[in-house]
Image (cartoon, rainbow, N blue to C red):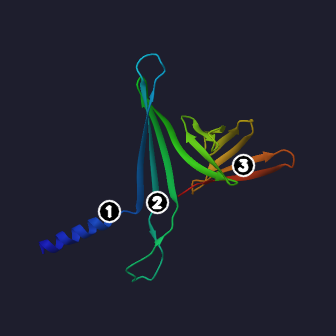
Amino acid sequence: MKNLITILVLILGVTVYAQNTNVTKETKTTTVTVDDGTGEPKKLVKTQHTEARQNVEVKQTGRNTLNKDIKETPVKVTEKTTISGDGIATQELGETIRYELKGKTYILIKDNSGFKVYSPENEELGVIRKTSKTTYIYQTKDHKVSLGYFDNNGNFIIESYNNDDDSVKTERFSRITQ
């Protein structure tokens, strides 16, 4: 009887703690030595942490089916980069998220006030700042201001007012998943 109870407790424990998320973590470290001619060469260390997270879901099949197929779900990729070195305190550059709009890839880097938006060529295009509610203000480098919000899938939706035809234009930065 004791063995039966022990087996049941183990089975229930394994079932409760079953994993339902795939997580892949990768760390890439780059070390650069800089000799500026003023004395000792200085080392700079850039560490990039990448995490890919995907929910595991099964396709609906018959009730008594033993082997079930896994359903495709989006992968959310986040990156964090830190820089440290001789005479430099460790600095975190922020979380990096990639988005796509009209066939171009954009990079959002989280900072203390919100996000900075960069082109694939690392040109700063604008900033995103959180308001007191769940919306954000998006201001481009040429001072165009729009309102935005993140939807349930992590996409960033921008709504801009067009003064010429008194309309609101909606654009969606689609979060890139692997």
Lateral position of residue 152 relative to residue 169, left or right: left
Report which residue position mark 1 lands on: 17
Secondary structure at numbered mark 3: strand
Q: Which amino acid, mark 2?
A: Gln
Taking depth in this image into account, of 89 and 158 the one nearest to the observer is 89
What is the x, y in percent for residue 129?
62, 38
Secondary structure at numbered mark 1: loop
Residue 111's place in the image compared with 15, above or below, is above
**Circle on res. 159:** 3
Residue 73's place in the image compared with 98, above or below, is below
What is the x, y in percent for residue 25?
41, 51
| Most distant residue in the right direction | 164
User: Which residue is at 53% across, 44% downward?
Assistant: 96
Within 10 Å of disc 1 (Cα), the crowding (few <14, some 14-19, many 20+) is: few
| Most distant residue in the top direction | 38
Report which residue position mark 2 lands on: 54
What is the x, y in percent for residue 107?
60, 45
